[in-house]
Amino acid sequence: MEEIEEDLEVNDQQEEKKYRERLNYQGLLMQRINSIMIAIDQGYNPYDNTNSLLSILIPEIKGPIEGEI
């Protein structure tokens, strides 16, 4: 009986960890989607090379990145 209770506790902890990881992932995804929606609302043109994806995610970047990475 004690083994079953211990297995249930371990399983509950694993399920809780998976649930928290999933919530964290969903939160990060929603932040990125929100950033892209704001950029589109402010006039981001994905076909214009003067803006990069980083300029959406990091507003301080105002143009294409020059030089080697």
Image (spheres, rainbow, N blue to C red):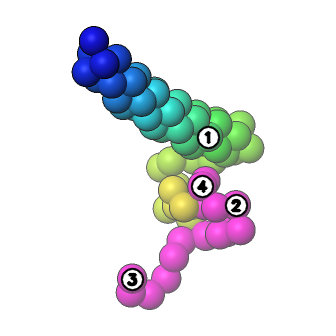
Looking at marks 3 and 4 on the same chain, the residue that comes earlier in the sequence is marked by 4
Residue placed under numbered mark 2 in the picture: 59
- At numbered mark 3, what does the secondary structure look like: helix, strand or loop? loop
Q: Earlier in the sequence, mark 3 or mark 2?
A: 2
Distance, label 1 to label 4, CA atoms, is 9 Å
Find the distance from the CA under tag 3 to the CA under tag 1.
26 Å
Q: Quadrant of residue 18?
A: top left
Spatial separation of the CA atoms under disc 2 and disc 4? 6 Å
C-alpha distance separating marks 3 and 4? 18 Å
Can you tell which of label 1 and label 4 is closer to the viewer? Answer: 1
Amino acid beneath label 1: Gln
Residues packed near mark 1 inside 10 Å, few (<14), some (14 to 19) or many (20 plus): few
What type is the residue that disc 3 sits on?
Answer: Ile
Q: Against 38, is 64 above or below?
A: below
The magenta span reads 55-69
Q: Amino acid at mark 2?
A: Pro
What label does residue 57 carry, if any? 4
Query: Closer to the observer: label 2 or label 1?
Result: 1
> Tag 2, which secondary structure?
loop
- Residue at 46% in and 27% down: 16
- Which residue lies under the disc numbered 3? 69
Pick whichever, 10 or 55, lies toward us: 10
Q: Secondary structure at mark 1?
A: helix
Q: Nearer the viewer, residue 27 or 47?
A: 27
Q: Which residue is mark 1?
A: 31
